[in-house]
Image (cartoon, rainbow, N blue to C red):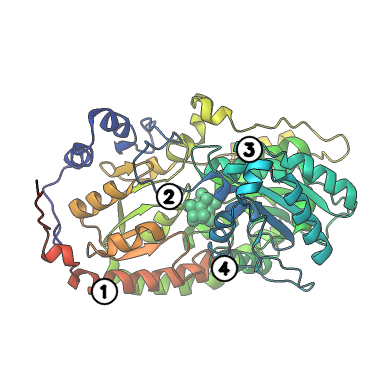
Amino acid sequence: MSTSKTKVVQWEPADIKDELLKKYPPKVARKRAKQIMINEATESEAPPEIVANVRTIPGIITMRGCTYAGCKGVIMGPTRDIVNITHGPIGCGFYSWLTRRNQTSAGPDGENYMPYCFSTDMQDQDIIFGGEKKLEAAIQEAYDLFHPKGICIFSTCPVGLIGDDVHAVARKMKAKFGDCNVFAFSCEGYKGVSQSAGHHIANNQVFTHLVGENTEPKEGEYKINLLGEYNIGGDGFEIDRIFKKCGITNLATFSGNSTYDQFASAQHADLSCVMCHRSINYVADMLETKYGIPWIKVNFIGASSTAKSLRKIGEYFGDKKLIEKIEAVIAEELPGVEAVAADVRSRTEGKTAMMFVGGSRAHHYQDLFNEMGMKTISAGYEFGHRDDYEGRAVIPDIKVDADSRNIEEIEVKADETLYRERKSPEEIKALEESGFKFKHYDGLNPDMDKGTIIVDDLNQYEAEKLVELMKPDLFCAGIKEKYSIQKLGVPMKQLHSYDSGGPYAGFQGAINFYKEIDRLVGSKVWSYMKAPWQEKPELTATFVWE
Ligand code: CFM
């Protein structure tokens, strides 16, 4: 494998696809071919169909995580004042303990259980005789020690296999305590094809057991909820700083730096702003159906996207005072960001990046790279669905398979007492006629150039092959990919945990990002490195027959 950084220009996208598939047995190649596409989408044409959100082929080293990770780690993990108990062997709890860099502020009450790792630590005998008693004891112990507002129970794979009824235990304990909301999640790791199923399971339960509980009205002007922002590396702090400056009241973030009460009060907001639609768009729909809160898509990754999203919020409320304030904030913040962008651009212009992250960042981060003059030549999601690639309009055409049917869709209807119309149908219509889009997001494909390579559920082998063939100046993914990519001589940036950096959202975040990427793509250190097997590529061995 070459570590030279010269670009290989002779590769056509179709050749690259063939190269990626060449090593596979025919059946595997046929399956993967439907998840590797040469982008043909343009803004005017419908993007071609991609196969997404299907099981990873056994034997392939996927980048994906499990359903438990999506439920416990992603959605519920960032809420500080709920005790999250993993019901299962200790490894699941341990490896989901503070590994996602979702930051939190302990708040004035200091009620913060995030530094703790709660687990029932199941042993062989619990698997054989059942773990419900142990779970009950763990819930009791957590209650006695902390008296939290809420306790959540997360099922790991063995719990589903042996059939412990976690929901019955939760109901029993909730009734016993009277002042602590206990509920459980059937989020066994194998439950869905990826962590995406875990998001859905978590959000359904939060919506059923928590949202709407606090009926006391909330103070503040221009009340919104921010859905799908998880405060990785402090992103949520930066977004909240900007909201505050604009005079926008963010009642509840789902779920970065959130509290029990934020979820419980979310129905008081007048607008839901959806950041990572992959993990939560159905909650925005449910909030609208049940409480009458309209929703819009926002993106605070990238300075221009941040400005655009703020303006969209201003337009929705339609209040002159807010619109002027937002313009003043943009006028104050943007020039500083643009100055840094212009400076780094002199070095980063024309450089290339690849991005294989989760279910929304592989799209959102392209805005930041565009601002630096960098091109994304290949990208994809680990667990995105077709709408994340092709846009929300394809949702009615998405085939429901056995795996997606496995994840409950909850039915909601307008709440008799809490439903309140935020805008009249005429007001909504007038906004839409002026080009304002509710409930809408575009996919990744139409935003990428023709001929770029889009790969769903990229795996270890394909990642290395892509890097070897296309030699990007930067590769973005997660910790599992980091070192193998660096060993190929290419700088690697983690876009899940941000390595140790961040925030990258909002205006200040964009500055952080430009500077860091400038340093990374300007550094030659990885290309000087040779792994031992690159110097002596072959190990020889012989069979000894006796
Ligand atoms: Fe949404 Fe996320 Fe993402 Fe996601 Fe994630 Fe994450 Fe992600 Mo890692 S909720 S889909 S499950 S933006 S943990 S904060 S970085 S894969 S792209």
Decide which of tag 4 and tag 1 comes sooner along the chain.
4
At 71% across and 71% down in the image, what residue appears?
A: 106
Whole-Å distance between the Cαs marked 4 and 1?
26 Å
Corner quadrant of residue 82: bottom right
Residue 190 in picture, x, y percent from top left: 53, 39
In the picture, the disc for residue 162 is 3
In-front residue for pair 414/498: 498
Residue 263 in picture, x, y percent from top left: 74, 52
What amino acid does circle 2 point to?
His
In-front residue for pair 315/229: 229
Residue 452 visible in the snapshot: yes
In the picture, the disc for residue 523 is 1
Mark 4 near mark 1, Cβ–Cβ under 8 Å? no
Q: Where is mark 4, residue-wise?
A: 234
What amino acid does circle 3 point to?
Ile
SS for callout 2: helix
At 55% across and 50% down in the image, what residue appears?
A: 69
Mark 3 near mark 2, Cβ–Cβ under 8 Å? no
